[in-house]
Image (cartoon, grey):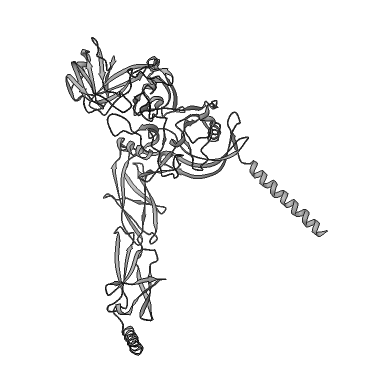
Amino acid sequence: MNILKKFYLLMIFLLLLMASSLVKLSAIDTYYDDTETAGYQQIENVDTRSFYNGILYQKNLGNIITSSAINQVSYAMLSGNPNDDTKVVSYAYHSTNDAFQRASLSTIALDYEAKHPGWKVMGITNGDQFTLGRGNNLNSEGKDPYIYQPYYPYIADNEKYFSIRATGGGGSFVGIKNEGNDPLVQVSANLDQISGLKLTIFDELGNEITKFDVDNLNTDPGNGEIAIFSPYYTDIIGTIPNVTASGDNVFFVGNSKLAYVSNSKEYSEIFKGTPKENQAVDAFYGKGNISEVGTNFSVSKGQFAIISNNIELNNALSIGTLVRAQYEYINDEYNNLESGMGFHTVQRDNGVDRAVSGAYNINKRPRSLIGRKLDGTISLIVIDDYLKTYGTTGYGINAILKKEGIVEAYQMDGGGSAQMYIRENDGFIPVTQSADYSTPTQQRIVLNALLFVVRTEEISHKWISSDLREIKLKVDLVESYGKDIQKLYVYINNNYFLVDEEGYCNINNLAVGTEFEYDIYSENSFGEKSKTIYSGVASSAKPEPELMGFTYEFIDDKISFTVNIKDSKDAIIGEKMNVSGKSATKINGKYTFPLSYLNSVPIIVCNYNLNDGQGVKQINFYCFGQINSLMAADSIILQQQILINSIYKN
């Protein structure tokens, strides 16, 4: 009976345990897309980091649940509220004056910072799809001669680099206003919304003075008209022959900031079954200073010329004048956008999922998105291939968007392009993995990107030196960019340390030989401290190694040393024993060498680094200080014994 009771009690306990587990399982929130085709369950928040101005980074692992399977998925997300000092921008890299180039995300981020003083990148994701080369269907082989460009219109720094899509028509894109609760705007930029090619003239400070309509591209102007001449690709090899610009008044931009023809009515090949002449359209962007004025110029790639029969324009232009030519929109809201980028699909709009269709969205892929929450928070999301499950479907995307409270979202380029990098100190680290590579550090090159950027001061900081319980830093305010900064502090070891007027900061009362992370803070006129983006790592010095003693023993015709060196913080980076100009062999912690070497004092040579800013040093420890009499006697007796044994053997 007691055995039965124990059995029943055990069964009850197991049932209660199972019930408890079921309760815990059912308590996990599941977020479904509107069709309930896929649900998302959070498993783990792998990483969370707070950046400057409230930008938040998160890395999450979870399950995508469908009627047929449960698949793990990982995604990274950057979120923040746009304001005067925080915004999301689009950007692309170019090192030449005739085209954009594909580049890694870290290269694009560093280039943005170099060309936008006072702004720093907190995180970056890939942008929209782009042409792979000159060719039919935008592939690397074919007939249509395209330059590298995004599939859709592209705006950055208020410049309409591509107002017309590569295939010759209009195109939808998402504009970024960076203000209010509705910072994103969906634009359908069809050709009937293009107001034409505009020539803008700027003053010496870069302010817009006036604007003219341009009548022709690569075609001579009529009476009172304006034309622009610039060369374009004529074959898939990449030939760009010069064009000739001649007339009574020709203004030549020989060294432009950027100039290219991205589309031409001269392209007559068929694109995706549609005769190109039925959708033929010109597209051009050029900006630079007038370098010469004359009547005839041969125009090469990266250059453009203005032929003017317009008296008002002739009077407005001269050598040195900054001009820009670009296709603009009828709608001024679109023209005033600082950033804009094409998207693959609209995923959510006004809190409602868009229908999922097409093989691209029904199949699993890594994904990249931009979206907003009801309060205006902008989020950049990358669903990557870190788990080697190759991302998720459009239904899975929408389930994740539900979980994150995102009410409007646009899908960027996916597949191997889907990547995210975040700031770490003065560089950038990958937090996702491209599906094209086996490790996160391998970067897929892309054409353009979306960046979370912040306006910040420029501060230089470096670790100067250290003592056992003290660190010395050099911290300088290079440029405030208009910010109210009265003092700088180093926050380290849970304390603030003031930077003096010479830019030095002495941090004391630290643990010996310990590495510390630090942050730089600024203080304004009201005594309010603010964390800057600048941080680093420094160490208090390690104690020097000390020779505490040694022992030795004779083994046949050899002598073996065991050396006791005190090195409590592992300062030693290399150690060896020299004797009579020869090196001893260290085996099992003991230095052993023939007695015949013992004509001088054995020396332990230690290379060490105290992390005191002085680099690697060397110290010599002399065994015995001098050969002591006991060891000398032992050595003589031993060698005599060896000699006697040798005589008897012979």
The residue shown at (74%, 54%) is: 10
- In the image, taking residue 184 as reference, residue 240 lies left or right, namely left
Q: Nearer the viewer, residue 571 or 139?
A: 139
Residue 330 seen in render: no
Residue furthest left as drawn? 294
Tell me residue 388's x, y (percent).
Answer: 51, 42
In the depicted structure, whether residue 482 falls above or below residue 227? below
Quarter occupied by the C terminus = bottom left
Quarter occupied by the N terminus = bottom right
In the depicted structure, whether residue 462 falls above or below residue 70? below
Indicate the quadrant where residue 117 lies. top left
Residue furthest right as drawn? 1
Tell me residue 323's x, y (percent).
Answer: 25, 23
In the depicted structure, whether residue 363 falls above or below residue 575? above
Tell me residue 361's x, y (percent).
Answer: 52, 30
Residue furthest top as drawn? 223
Indicate the quadrant where residue 282 lies. top left
- In the image, taking residue 378 as reference, residue 161 lies left or right, namely left
Q: Nearer the viewer, residue 68 or 574?
A: 68
Tell me residue 236's x, y (percent).
Answer: 33, 26
Q: Nearer the viewer, residue 461 or 632?
A: 632
Residue 142 seen in render: yes
In the depicted structure, whether residue 562 falls above or below residue 249? below
The residue shown at (22%, 13%) is: 310
Q: Nearer the viewer, residue 172 or 25?
A: 172
The residue shown at (42%, 18%) is: 274
Q: How many labels, in total?
A: 0
